[in-house]
Amino acid sequence: MTILDDILCVKRLEVKQLLMEEHIVSRETISSRPSLFHLLRASSKLEVIAEMKRASPSKGMIASETDPVEQAKIYEKAGVACISVLTDETFFKGSMTDLEAVTNVVKTPVLCKDFIIHEVQIDRAKRAGASVILLIVAALEDDQLLRLHRYAASIGLEVLVEVHDVNELERALVIDARIIGVNNRDLRTFTVDLAKTEEVAKRFPFHEDRVFISESGIRDSVDAKRVAATGAAAVLVGETLMRSMNAEAAITSLQIVKAGATS
Ligand SMILES: O=C(O)c1ccccc1NCC(=O)[C@H](O)[C@H](O)COP(=O)(O)O
């Protein structure tokens, strides 16, 4: 059993519980938040998706006491493209309460970062005010991936589809994912390697209307420049920002101007 298997076991139990509770389906299809996709397409700099991450399976406690509202305000002031909130309780010490607290105070796109395997979790994310959800290709069968991707779109949510290799990229392209992130962290072994971004970028159809994101293990401007050189539109950063004494400055150092851009 890998950590991803363990996480998915817990998610199946959570879904069972959620299905026993009142299930309110959202009918609102228009988000009050800007589109992450359009924001990333239009930007001339490497954008930052800043994560609220209290703990993780690979690092244990990172910043358990951080106030999500204060952290989100710092992120928004620094001009991030999106705020990611880990909502898993068991492995990441996050919560839907954290997500709601953040969506109540910021206007940026907000990503509900969880291990989504069922529509009921998507409805819950929508109700909590998220505008983007995560679907992890490694956690889903092809038919599930397609169904959940379509469902999210049908209720006005954008989807970050996460891959770890070229095979998973192909699966993301089959469902016509527009926002695709490469997780540099192997969710089974915890190994982090920015070369994953370079490997997947070589096969990414940059000429199509899609955006490419590099996730995990980004520590400084050297890492940011390395992944920006692959064509990445954004980096998703958790631990570095949560541990930073000056998250605003840390974000600014990652928002590098892309090669060829005039400003
Ligand atoms: O972070 C982990 O240990 C982890 C373990 C198993 C599944 C997922 C995991 N992380 C989720 C993420 O994708 C990261 O929180 C995110 O990309 C930010 O990564 P980092 O900047 O390295 O904190």
Image (cartoon, grey):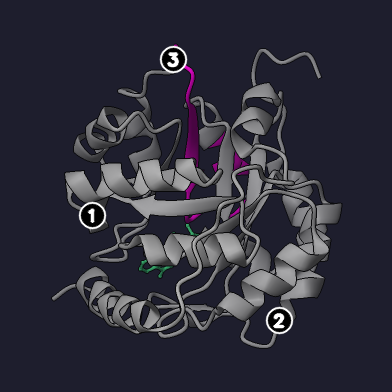
Q: Which residue is mark 2?
A: 66
Q: Secondary structure at mark 1?
A: loop
Specify start and end residues of the magenta stretch as a single range. 207-226
* In front of the other: 38 or 45: 38
Q: Residue at x 75, y 49 (%)?
A: 108
Q: Residue at x 77, y 58 (%)?
A: 75
- Residue 243 visible within the image: no
Left-right relation of 167 to 148: left
Image-quarter location of ligand 1: bottom left
Q: Label 2: state its secondary structure.
A: loop
Q: Say left or right for 220 vs 191.
A: right
Quadrant for the C terminus in the image: top right
Task: In the rendered structure, find residue 254 and report the number of the disc placed on it.
Answer: none
Disc number lying in front (3 or 1): 1
Asked whether residue 217 is drawn in magenta, I would say yes
Query: Furthest residue to the right?
Result: 77
